[in-house]
Amino acid sequence: MRSIHRIYLPDEDIPIYDYVKNRKLVKYYTRETMAAVIAVSQLFEGHPIPSDMPFFYSTGETETLDFYRKICSEYSQISEEFSSLGFIENIVPMISPIQQFKMMRNTTSCFLSIEYGLKGDNALLLASASGLLYSAMFAETKGSVLIGSGKLYADGTVECGFAEVLPYEIENHPMLNSTDDAIALFKTPYFSDNVSSNHRI
């Protein structure tokens, strides 16, 4: 088992161009995606990533308050009362397609799969530590499984964690029936970060 946990603070640059192969896609990346791509690169440094490795990723609620503040500000310029139709007709066309794309919950897992050529079984989960562990345990593979989780906070802080595990290694994990967010897995001694970095907590 190998694992990694990374945190980038609100004003901290994420050096994505030092790690990414397809630079043209970076404009679509969120801070969570950037952190995740770097973490996976560091986790597998010097090790090939099998394209058929099962990959399960859990994302937390994306607290992108700036996005919602902009929407509210735009809507406040309209004199009519709020309505769904008014929102669709007047506000949605004003939101950048790139920004809308970044709000998709599966953005990070999709770009990780593209960047590292992951074509095996995969799934996106929402927040669940237990679901992430059970997905890995029951993966149909004789090899290892890549699991990961990330969260983007309202102030711009982002954290993510990844582990390459064999299903039997997590059979007795203490968080198998936990209701905690999946990111909590990577803050426990069980998944202690064993990849060196300046961003270790």
Image (spheres, rainbow, N blue to C red):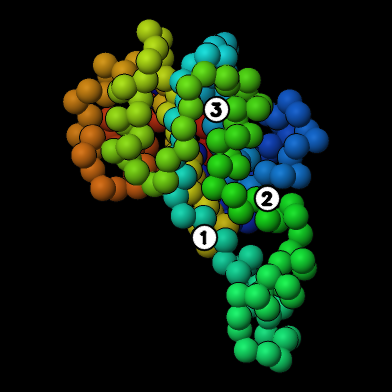
Residue at image coords 51%, 55%: 62
Residue 80: x and y, percent? Answer: 68, 90
Q: Quadrant of the N terminus?
A: top left
The residue beneath circle 1 is 63
Q: Are marks 2 and 1 in contact (CB under 8 Å)?
A: no
The residue beneath circle 3 is 40
Q: CA distance from mark 2 to mark 1?
A: 15 Å
> Reading the chain from its start, which is encountered first: label 2 or label 1?
1
The residue beneath circle 2 is 101
Say which element carries label 2. helix
Q: Taking 150 as reference, is 116 above or below it?
A: above
Q: Taking 138 as reference, is 71 above or below it?
A: below
Q: Are marks 3 and 2 in contact (CB under 8 Å)?
A: no
> Reading the chain from its start, which is encountered first: label 3 or label 2?
3
Q: Determine whether, in the image, residue 68 is placed left or right of residue 56.
A: right
Q: Determine whether, in the image, residue 121 is placed left or right of residue 16.
A: left
Which label sits on residue 121?
none
Residue at image coords 70%, 29%: 20
Q: As shown in the figure, which amino acid type bears the numbered disc 3? A: Val
In-front residue for pair 57/39: 57
Q: Quadrant of the C terminus?
A: top left
Q: As shown in the figure, which amino acid type bears the numbered disc 1? A: Glu
